[in-house]
Amino acid sequence: MEHARPSRTALRVAMRRAAHQLCDARPLVFEDPMAVAILGPHAAEIERTPGRDPANKPRPYSISLRAFLVARSRYAEDLLAQAVQRGVTQYVLLGAGLDTFAHRNPYPGLRVFEVDHPATQLWKRELLGNGPLAAPTNLAYVPVDFERQSLAGQLSVVGFDGSAPTFFAWLGVVPYLTLDAFRATVTFIASQSPGSGLVFDYAQPRSVLSPREQLAYDSLASRVQLAGEAFQLFFTPAQVAAELAAFYDLEDLGSPEINERYFANRRDGLRVIGSAPRIASAWL
């Protein structure tokens, strides 16, 4: 992402979450009644979605991308609910973008820390300041450039308790990082109190994809590169397991597992296709 500009991919992700609320069949995979409101003036830009515009031809990989984005948010918040039951009192969203959880937080004792690039965070706060959503009292904004600043140092400034069990959601970030930045963050999370947990998504290397999926990947990669946010980090499941050796109860979901859990028996075609996107979670 360019240094002084908010993330364009964060906006596209938020628009797809909003499109899920407006366009997909009930029951929704991920209920977010604030997904449209947080977009403010950008709500008018919500992508045309197959089934909403009769003239719009179905785009399987576009539908799949929307399915994956809402599934990873649902998965993260499902795990957060388990974490709170286990005694977690802090929730850190790494690369929060336009996430709305802090405005829907059903857990009175849970403090939320939104970590993101300073430019993206300023943009989000401006949208909120001009919109209908009230500022939560248990939310702390943490501006961090993952490639240049210390996550631990920035969290400490806003009252993060390093001795309290914490759940970390790291969605839509890992593919844009260097390996050094990824490992520095994993090392920090691994140093947290027992009972802490982590969820993140990642993509497999292009070389392991089918020819058809490689074409879809190339199209998406070119778009994010034009937005100044190029993909650069990929893992296989075996590599993820090695990177998370300090954790236990690793769960790593590919499209078959995601579809069985969240998209079974749907009639609207909403499902994840291909082998590139994966979601992983682990605990301390």
Image (spheres, rainbow, N blue to C red):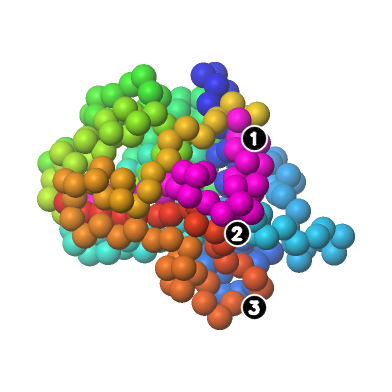
Dot 2: within a 10 Å radius of its alpha carbon, few (fewer than 14), some, or many (20 or more) residues?
Answer: some
Considering the whole magenta stretch, tell me its main secondary structure.
Answer: helix
Please state the horizontal and vertical placement of residue 17, each as a whole percent of the image: 58, 54
Q: Which element carries disc 3, helix, strand or loop?
A: loop
The residue lying at 15 percent from left, 39 percent from top is 191
Query: Label 3: which residue?
Result: 267
Identify the amino acid type marked 2.
Ser
Q: For residue 145, what is the image quadrant?
A: top left
Task: Specify the label residue 66 is tagged with.
Answer: none
Is 219 inside the magenta-drawn segment?
yes
In the drawing, does residue 184 fall left or right of residue 33? Answer: left
The residue lying at 65 percent from left, 71 percent from top is 269
> Residue lying furthest bottom in this view?
265
Q: For residue 153, what is the image quadrant?
A: top left
Query: Label 2: which residue?
Result: 64
Q: Nearer the viewer, residue 210 or 105?
A: 210
Q: Are marks 1 and 3 in contact (CB under 8 Å)?
A: no
Mark 2 vs mark 3, CA separation in Å: 14 Å
Q: Which element carries disc 1, helix, strand or loop?
A: helix
- N-terminal of the pair, mark 1 or mark 3, is 1
Query: Label 1: which residue?
Result: 222
Q: Which element carries disc 2, helix, strand or loop?
A: helix
Please state the horizontal and vertical placement of residue 163, each as a whole percent of the image: 12, 41
Q: Which residues are magenta?
A: 196-225
Q: Nearer the viewer, residue 41 or 47?
A: 47
- N-terminal of the pair, mark 2 or mark 1, is 2
Identify the amino acid type marked 1.
Ser
Q: Nearer the viewer, residue 216 or 115?
A: 216
Q: Which mark is in front, 1 or 3? A: 1
In the drawing, does residue 207 fall left or right of residue 245? Answer: right
Please state the horizontal and vertical placement of residue 245, each as a whole percent of the image: 19, 47
